[in-house]
Image (spheres, rainbow, N blue to C red):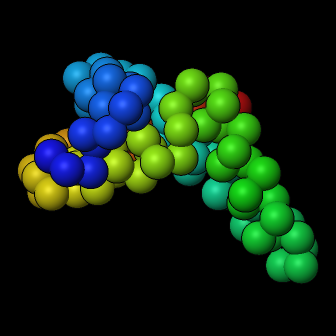
Amino acid sequence: MALISCGNSEGRSIEILEDESKLIDLIVDMHIAEATINRQNILYRDSLRIHYRDNILLIHDISELDYDTVFWIIQQDVAKYRGIQEEVYQKLKIIKDNS
C-alpha cells in the first residue's frame, strides 16, 4: 500500500486498522464533534471543525495523514466499512441514551 509506506506513519496506520475498537472510538469522537459544531453559528464552524479535528487526533495519538489513510483503506472494503459504521452508530446510541 503506497499510501502508508513512508516512515513512522505506516506503523500507526496499521495499529489503528488492527485495533477496531480504537478506530471506532476515534470515529465516535469525530461524530460527536461534528454534531457539536453543527449547533454553532455558521460563521465559526470551519475554524471549530479544524480545532476539534486537531484535538481529537491529538487525543487519539494519530496524525491527520494516518487518519485520512486509515479512512481511505477501510472505505475500500464496503462490508468492513458498513460494519464499523454500524458499531459507531450503536455506540453513539448508547451514549445518547445514557445522557
- Residue 95 as seen in the image, left or right of residue 52: left
Q: Is residue 64 shown to the viewer in this render? A: yes
95 versus 3 height, above or below: above
Give whichever of 36, 63 is nearer the camera: 63
42 versus 30 height, above or below: below
23 versus 3 height, above or below: above
Give whichever of 14, 32 is nearer the camera: 14
Picture residue at 32% right of the left edge, 24% below the top:
11
Task: List x then y, in percent, for residue 59.
Answer: 65, 26
Give whichever of 48, 4 is nearer the camera: 4
Q: Residue furthest front?
A: 7
Picture residue at 29% right of the left edge, 56% below the top:
72
Task: List x then y, in percent, for residue 53.
Answer: 66, 49
Q: Is residue 28 shown to the viewer in this render? A: no
Task: List x then y, in percent, for residue 92.
Answer: 50, 39
Picture residue at 57% right of the left edge, 32% below the top:
95
